[in-house]
Amino acid sequence: MSYYPLTTLPDYFLMDELLTDEHKLIRQSVRDWVESFVMPKIDDAAQNHTDIPNLMKELGKIGALGPYIPEEYGGSGLDQISYGLIMQELERGDSAVRSAASVQSSLVMFPINEFGSEEQKRKFLPQLASGEMIGAFGLTEPNHGSDPGSMETHFEDKGDHYLLNGAKMWITNAPLCDIAVVWGKNEEGKIQGLIVERAFEGFTTPETHNKWSLRASKTGELVFNNVKVPKENLLPNVTGLKGPLSCLNSARYGISWGVIGAAVDCYCTALQYSKERKQFGKPIGGFQLQQKKLAEFLTEITKAQLLCLQLGRLKNDHKATPAQISMAKRNNVKMAIDIARESRQILGGMGIMGEFPMMRHAANLESVITYEGTHDVHLLITGMDITGINAFG
Ligand code: TGC
Ligand code: FAD
C-alpha cells in the first residue's frame, strides 16, 4: 500500500475548465478503482514478478477496454480525451496496468474494429471489451524491433487456410492471451494481419522471465510452427506496414497521457514527503535545491498535460498526425522517467522502499521509453517530418 493515497491531479493551468463533466466523471471513477483495486496489490505483484489476477476482467468492468470502440461492439463510444484520461489514471497506479489496457484497446480491438470483417467484429470485440478474452499484438521479432518492415514471420495460402510460420518476441500478455493479432508477410511479401487463436495447433507462447521492468506485466513470445489459420481470420481491410503502425498511433497516444499519471504519482508523493521530512530543523521542502526540483517537476507535468489535451482535440477531429503523436510520446515519457528518477532522491533512503512508487515507476518507464517506438525512433520520425529526409536507413 502506498504511504500516500492518490491525491487530486495538479491542474496548474486550470485545464479542468476545458474538460466536460463526463471527462471528469470518467477520470474520477478510474482513479477510485485504481486506489481500491490496484494500489493494495501492485507492489507485491511487482516485487514477485507476477501479474494482478483477473486484471483484464476488472478493467472490462470499469469500461477501460476499447472505450472509443462503438457500443454495438461492446465499447463505450467515448472520445479520445476520455481514452487519454483513462490511460492517465491507470498508469498513476502502474504502467503494467495501463499496458494491459493499451494493448487490448489499441493493439487488438482497434485493428479488428478498423480493418476487420463484420464477422470478426461481432465474434471478438464484445469479449475483448468485457475482458473475458485477452488479446496480444505480435509485431516485434527477435531480429526486427525498430525495423518491423523487415519482419520474417510469413504465411502461405493453402487454399482453405493459411500456413503461418515465424516468431514474435517481447509480446505483452503473450502467456495469457486467447487470441493474438499477428503481422506477417504473405507470399507476395506484403504485410497483413491474422487473428491467431490459442487453440490453433503449433501456436505456443513461452513466458519471458527475469525482467527488472514492468514486472507486474506478463511478457512472452509468440511462436508459430506450421500453424493453420482459417481464411476468415485474415484482417481483410489493410495491407502494408501502415496496418500495424496505425494501431501504434493509437497506443502511443494513450501512452503520452498514461505517463503523466506516473509522473504525477511521483511528484505528489515527493511534494507531500518534502513537507513532512525535517532536516536541520526545517522541512526539506524549505531548501532551495528541493524546491527547484519540485517546481521543475510541476512545470514539465503542466507542459505535458497541455500537449496531450491539444493532441486529444486533434485526434477527436481526426487531424492528429503520426509525427505529432511521436513528439508527444517521446516528450512525455522522457518527462516522466526524469521525474521518477529525480523525485526518488527527495525521499532519501525511503525513496527506495516499495511503500513509495518512484523506483517502480522508474523501472517501468525504462520499458515505456523503449516500446511503442524507442526514444530515438520518435526523434527520427519528427526529423523526417520536418526535413522530408528519412534518417532511419
Ligand atoms: P516507412 O517507409 O516510413 O513507411 C512504410 C509505410 O507505413 C506508413 N507509416 C505509417 N502509417 C500509419 N502510422 C504511422 N505511424 C506510420 N509510419 C509509417 C508509411 O506511410 C508507409 O505507407 P505506404 O502506404 O507508403 O506503404 O517505413 P519504415 O520501414 O521506414 O519504418 C518507419 C518507422 C521506423 C517509423 C516504423 O517502422 C516504426 O515506427 N518503427 C518502430 C516500431 C515500433 O514502434 N514497434 C512497437 C511494437 S508494439 C509495442 O511495442 C507494444 S508495447 C506494449 C504496450 O503498449 O503496452
Ligand atoms: P532495437 O530496434 O534493436 O533498438 C536497439 C537500439 O538501437 C535502440 O536504442 C534504438 O533506438 C536504436 N536504433 C534502432 N534503429 C535505429 C536507427 N535507425 N537510428 C538510430 N537508432 C536506432 N512489441 C510488440 O510487437 N508487441 C508487444 O506487445 C510488445 N510489448 C513489449 C513489452 C515490453 C516490456 C518491452 C520491453 C517491449 C515490448 N515490445 C512489444 C517490443 C518493443 O516494441 C521493442 O522492444 C521496440 O520496438 C524496440 O525494438 P528492439 O527492442 O528490438 O530494439
Image (cartoon, rainbow, N blue to C red):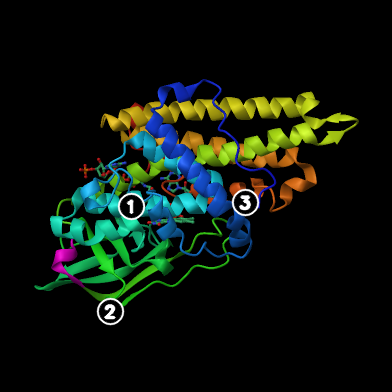
Name the disc covering residue 107, or none. Answer: 1
**First in residue order: circle 3 vs circle 1:** 1
Q: Quadrant of residue 144?
A: bottom left
The image shows residue 62 at horizontal and vertical percentages of 41, 50
Mark 3, Cα crowd under 10 Å, few <14 / some 14-19 / many 20+, is many
Comparing 77 with 251, the one in front is 77
Viewed as shown, does residue 327 lie left or right of 130?
A: right
Mark 2, Cα crowd under 10 Å, few <14 / some 14-19 / many 20+, is few
- Which residue carries the number 2 mark? 201
**First in residue order: circle 1 vs circle 2:** 1
State the residue at coordinates (56%, 22%).
Answer: 12
Secondary structure at numbered mark 3: helix
Q: Which residues are magenta?
A: 229-234
Give me the C-alpha separation between circle 1 and circle 2. Answer: 23 Å
Label 1–label 2 contact, CB within 8 A:
no
The image shows residue 240 at horizontal and vertical percentages of 21, 50
